[in-house]
Image: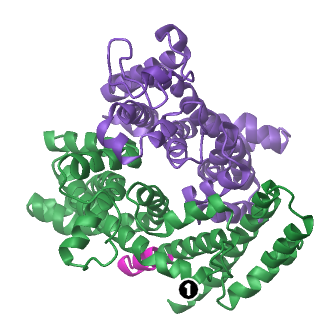
Chain colours: A green, B purple
Amino acid sequence: MWRYIIRRVFLQGIPVLLGFTFLLYLLLTIAPGSPVSHLRGVPNIDEAVIAQREAQLGINEPFIVQYTKWLGRVVRGDLGLSFDSSRRPVAELILERMPATILLSVCAIVVGWGIGIPVGILSARYQYSIFDYIITFFAFVGISIPSFFFGLILLYIFALKLNVLPAGGFFLAGETKTLLGYFQYLLLPTLTLGLSDIASVARYMRSSLLEVVGQDYLRTARAKGLSENIVVYKHALRNALLPILTLMGFMIPSIFSGAVIVESIFAWPGLGLLAIQAVNERNYPVIMGINLMFAVLIFIGSLIADISYAIADPRIRYE
Amino acid sequence: MNKFWRRFRRNKLAMAGLVILVLFVLSAIFAPFLTPYDPNRANLRERNQPPSKEHPFGTDDMGRDILARTLYGGRISLSVGLVSVGISLSIGVVLGAIAGYFGGFVDTLIMRLADIFYSFPFLILAITISAIFGPSIYNTMIILGVLSWPGPARLLRAEFLKLKTTDFVAAATALGARPGRIMFRHILPNAFSPLLVSATLQVASSILSEAGLSFLGLGVPPPAPSWGNMLNRARPLHVLAGMPWMWVAPGIAIFIVVLSINFVGDGLRDAFDPKQELQ
């Protein structure tokens, strides 16, 4: 297994990350405007001041020099300094925001899979029943409703009209962090982010189980006289759950994408909010840092998904 | 084709989706006949009005008619969805066909590039690119199209790998047809049905992405109405709480259109599925 992980990291992970950061940095530098372009709006500004500021930020050099320097620092664990007036280390900014995003994403995945899998199983077990039709319909609704619209509806009902949950944020300054507090702040953002996962996991689970149920070895199990419940829940389910594992790797990028919108609706102090702020300020080091962070998280997520797939299914070899 | 249509017609949800979709497209095209108001014209004397006889969906904070903005917004949201999928298909079909047909080094190169595009969160990259190039309708179309080519490319590559070993391709090769002709005249038409299904579903996700970008203020910029940027204007909590008419109409419009497209896509998939013949 270790050989497989090392091969994946060096042959796939690192080249992909290099290609990705190279393309992104190139885009940032060839794009019109620059982090100092707001200075040009200042009346009577001396060109020397702008040049000095550019030199200070290190953006007066050609693209390839800038990128190589950035990469050299990243390898040593230094993501550079933020371009805004605070000039704080980017790594510090990211570490400050990351726990909130990870917490929200993990909760959404737990809710999405925790609800999606049993619902999908029941839907397949009672195929063509009323329950199955209702679930199928709601799965379509879940993947079609824009997360921000769903989030606004939840916000409107529970925070603004019923006034039972906070309208966003994540603990006020000085507020004690109680378990109930976590629940109250997390509930609406988690549901908003998790809804489409509940829907798509339920759909995949249903079709995966239905596919397995039609196979020969299950006919054998039925022929032995086993009850349908044992056939489905014991024999079929194990095999049907396998393809669902691979889905996990695919869903992590979309969870992070969704987090950007959800964090923006609920003022959730995570990486997504930081990203929106950074792109609006053209804060290159922060933009690069966040994108790199997400790419690494996604790579690790897909690696874990593939490894757990290989552990769960002995037919899969590490290739 | 008749057989597909017959099977498609049996699917009630897909038919309902198709009818609703056609209605939305027609209402976007004929918007000027359905509302007397100019969607961009501010009227400060009629600001923040709840739904009434004159303004069935109410007015926004600049006194613009919400119904007019929702109808005209459909033009923008639907065309961004269609054009971006057109861009994504043009890139994806060519690269996927080349990768699948020639294989070897070219295939590895194209698929590694697809991996790079798959390895980051779509929306974060989209907001980054949109912010640096400046949000506009055309940039939104290009960003969504260029970022989503790996989907159709992977699909077409798989189809090409499957089809290139068939007898009719061997026959065409034996007759001396050039690779370009084999790829686009002989193989591509046979990959039409899975491509159509995936393109349909992609239009739905593209409309959702445009709305998401515009909601964050990094997609279609105001004053042009798009369903996403109409929701963006309703984000202040006092608007959200006190004037729900401003955000409910565009939100429902996105939801219904995306739901209908998903129903149609699903219906197409079932209609093209040869396994359905047995039932």
**Span colored in magenta:** A303-319
Q: Which of A20 and A214 is in front in this view?
A: A20
Residue at the disc numbered 1: A4
In which chain is the residue bearing label 1? Answer: A
Q: Is residue B63 visible?
A: yes
Up/down of A40 relative to A136, above or below: below
Q: Nearer the viewer, residue A213 or A109?
A: A109
Up/down of B62 relative to A20, above or below: above
Is disc 1 surrounded by few (<14), some (14 to 19) or many (20+) residues within 10 Å? few
On-image quarter of the C terminus of chain B: top left
Q: Can residue A316 be seen in this view?
A: no
Q: Nearer the viewer, residue A208 or B136?
A: B136
Residue occupying the point 50% across, 81% down: A95
Place of residue B80 in the rendered image (x, y in percent of width and height, measured from the top left): 60, 35
Classify residue A111 as left or right of residue A47. left
Residue occupying the point 72% across, 87% down: A73
Residue occupying the point 42% across, 45% down: B235
Judged from the image, the secondary structure of the residue bearing numbered disc 1 is: helix
Q: Does the magenta stretch include residue B59?
A: no
Q: Is residue A308 magenta?
A: yes
Place of residue B199 in the rendered image (x, y in percent of width and height, measured from the top left): 56, 38
Up/down of A118 relative to B1, above or below: below
